[in-house]
Amino acid sequence: MPPDSIETWVKNGLMDSETISKRFYEEVVCWTLTEEQHLEIRKKFDSYVPFEAQAHWDEETFTKYLAENSQSSSIPLLKEAAPILFSLMVYLSTFPLTIHKKNSEPPTLTYEDLIRAMHWLQLDPNDGLDRTKSPTDRRRYLFLGLADISDDFEFNKSEEMDISARKAFQVDDHARNWACINYDENGDEMYHDILDLISSDRMQYVDLPWGPYPKEDFVGLATHLTPPTRLRQLAISRARFKVLVGFLLAEYLNDGKIELSMDLEAVDSSAEIIVNSFCYGTGADDVITWPRFEYNLSENTSCLFTSIFRQIEKLKRGPDDRSYSDYDTYPPENMPTGYILNLATMSQFLSSFGSSMGIEDPTLLFEYEKNKPSSTSLTIDHLISLVKSKPEDQWDTKILLISGTNVSNRETVIFGALLGCNDIDGHRSALFQLAPYHDTFRGTYGMGARWKTESGDLSFGEQDEGFSMVLVARMDLMKVSQKITDKGIGTYCSTLWRGSWEM
């Protein structure tokens, strides 16, 4: 016989938030977890439950789990970051729906909640819910779970719809046929998250040979379930995000084997600098809107959340699981020592580059900080020869660091160059800034990365286009500029929101 109508499902209580969430849990277990992973998560969840009657994790339990998998030097930072991370997990446990609990009830995570939160946090693009998820989707889930402010922030709707449409299709080639726009005149991404979920073939109460109802039939129900506050009306406060970033940086190099002692003052400084970039400024009341969060996390600090992804992934990995993880990190075996480079600054720029450049034992070519003797007596000619030298190993990575004072405002600035192996045409190199903003300027494929000018200076990029750095021959002055023109993107890509500038 024909299937019941959607209206009948609603009347029978099959389409309320609680029932949908329970059904979604069953789909996650069935389609995205192996039996071994499911058993491992269950085992670890139960091991932290003090007695069977509780059957949930509260904030204290979740914090205990994180603490047991963190470096001892990170624990002071965890005390402030744990409530933020727990609220993120609680939000994702019912995502994309809103399930209201009694105000008197403190937030908790049941086992089913934990499974759902893990799914959204460690998103599989092909999760069986029809629309292919893009990396932007995952970043958006993080933003929504961290947002603590709502307001009528200004934005260009047409421009945001174009950006959203473009990023929805930035997926693997084999999955592009299942990608589709998720911001249109019917609603933004939050609306489409709900529409995607409730209209998915696997979430419908229809058996063969009857086909599922089309997505269009669920528009009215999705509109009813969508919260009134939309994505671009939300923001993350500066103070909240800085607390989280500090913990993420402190834990970035934690491989579970080597105990690292992080300088918490240096971590705090690096966290402040990263937050400056997310806030597009240094004001205490600055906030992070969705466009700012998406830009910085996608273009500037794509690996920032690696440490929490790794912590959550451990829940489904057994003690004998030696398989590759996307969240593995490799602390330097022989950390170069100097005035600028330390574990905190290493974590800071690795939040941009991750382990993709194989930075296990970086070679510190040159480090200069005003009013302190250089760690080396290199001449400009010797430095240039080192920059151009053929790497001894295919993963050889070289670092150049310069710290000084901006002559216009006396502000401390730090710039650097990260040079990858076989960097003949520049596409494996990048320039970066570590203070007072955190920024990356990646090399453009096929364009020359560096050369010695006629005056003997060491130059990176062209001064009339894109981002460039010039270390003068006497090695005590550097010229930095970013020029945004209509001619092209330059050897090193610019950061558009900062406009054209020089120092």
Image (cartoon, rainbow, N blue to C red):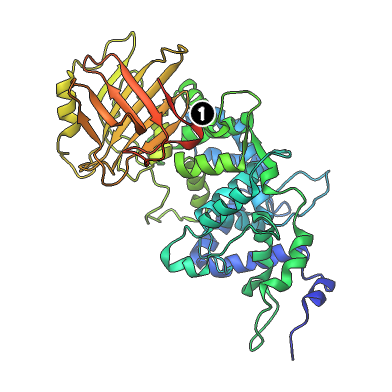
**Res. 465 image quadrant:** top left
Label 1 crowd (10 A; few <14 / some 14-19 / many >=20) = many
Quarter occupied by the N terminus? bottom right
Please tell me which residue is depicted at 56% across the width and 27% down the height of the picture.
281
Residue 109 image point, x, y percent:
68, 51
Q: Can residue 246 be seen in this view?
A: no
Q: Find the residue positioned furthest to the bottom.
A: 1
Quarter occupied by the C terminus? top left
Residue position for label 1: 271
Residue 233 image point, x, y percent:
70, 43
**Res. 347 image quadrant:** top left
Mark 1 element type: helix
Please tell me which residue is depicted at 31% across the width and 10% down the height of the picture.
372
Q: Find the residue positioned furthest to the front.
A: 486
Please tell me which residue is depicted at 54% across the width and 37% down the height of the picture.
67
The one of 270 and 218 positioned closer to us in this rendering: 218
Image check: 429 left or right of 302? left
Amino acid on which the number 1 mark rests in the picture: Ala
Q: Is residue 115 visible?
A: yes
Image check: 55 left or right of 288? right
Q: Is residue 38 above or below residue 156?
A: below
Q: In this view, does 138 lie above or below 284?
A: below
Q: Find the residue positioned furthest to the top.
A: 371
